[in-house]
Amino acid sequence: MNIGVKDIAEWIQTYHDMGIAMAFFLPLVEAFFPVLPLIAIVTGNAAAFGLWKGFLLTWLGACTGSILTFWLIRKISGTRFHHFLIKYKMIAAASHWFENHGFSVLFLLRCFPFSPSSLINVLAGLSTLPLHTYFWATVLGKAVMIFVLSFIGADLLDLLKEPWKFIPIILLILSLWFIGKKVEGRYLTK
């Protein structure tokens, strides 16, 4: 299957035709179902709606989904399901980890596109981390990550016409992945 720039341009137009509700809804749903590729959603939104509109739609959807997940997990607090989850040492340790490290680490994890967002939402919800800390770390960290990916997506067709421009982007994404894994590994062992 040979996909060309024209094919991608048609896909972007089709994506745009689905409307802004879908551009908001997809990142919201991704917070609950991590099998959806957030990187593809972000770049698709930016390619279809432009840098600022695509960024804003994705950011609002992703933040709404994350905060809803956090809130729903908090709602089960004290239930049998909550006690079932907390009984596992790794889950309990990870939720305590959020309590101990607070805003700065949560913000850093949110900045990296390869951090397991839905897992972070659940573990933070199981912790006693204050809602305002979770809210601001999520809103600000996701803004950084989504803006970087939106910037790439907004120039997607130009990048496809000049593929050599992907090299610094791929290096940036790999660097973010590597740094994210280092940060994640450092704090998960504590």
Image (cartoon, grey):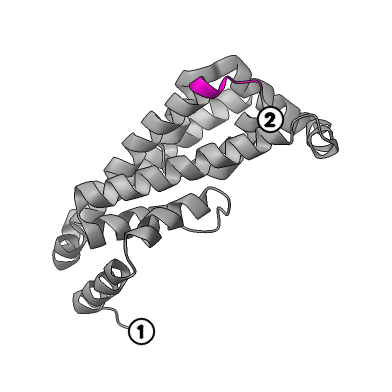
Q: For the view shown, which residue lies furthest in the top direction?
A: 100
- Name the residue that disc number 1 marks: 1
**On the rendered image, what quadrant is the C terminus found in?**
top right
Element at label 2: helix
Q: Position of residue 40 (x, y in %)?
A: 38, 58
**On the rendered image, what quadrant is the N terminus found in?**
bottom left
Q: Nearer the viewer, residue 154 or 134?
A: 134
Residue 32 visible at all: yes
Which of disc 2 and disc 1 is earlier in sequence?
1
Q: Residue at x 44, y 26 (%)?
A: 137
Q: Position of residue 116 (x, y in %)?
A: 54, 43
Query: On screen, 111 above or below 136?
Result: below
Asked if residue 129 lies in the magenta stretch, the reply is yes
- Amino acid beneath label 1: Met
In space, the residues marked 1 and 2 are separated at their CA atoms by 45 Å
- The residue stretch that appears in magenta: 128-132
Q: Residue at x 35, y 53 (%)?
A: 42
Residue 168 visible at all: no
- Amino acid beneath label 2: Leu
The answer to which quarter of the image holds residue 158 is: bottom left
Element at label 1: loop
- Name the residue that disc number 2 marks: 126
Q: Is residue 93 left or right of residue 117?
A: right
| Main SS of residues in magenta | loop
Asked if residue 135 lies in the magenta stretch, the reply is no
Q: Residues within 10 Å of mark 2 (few under 14, many from 20)?
A: many
Q: Residue at x 21, y 46 (%)?
A: 52
Q: Is residue 42 left or right of residue 51?
A: right
The answer to which quarter of the image holds residue 71 is: top right
Q: Position of residue 89 (x, y in %)?
A: 79, 29
Q: Position of residue 22 (x, y in %)?
A: 39, 61
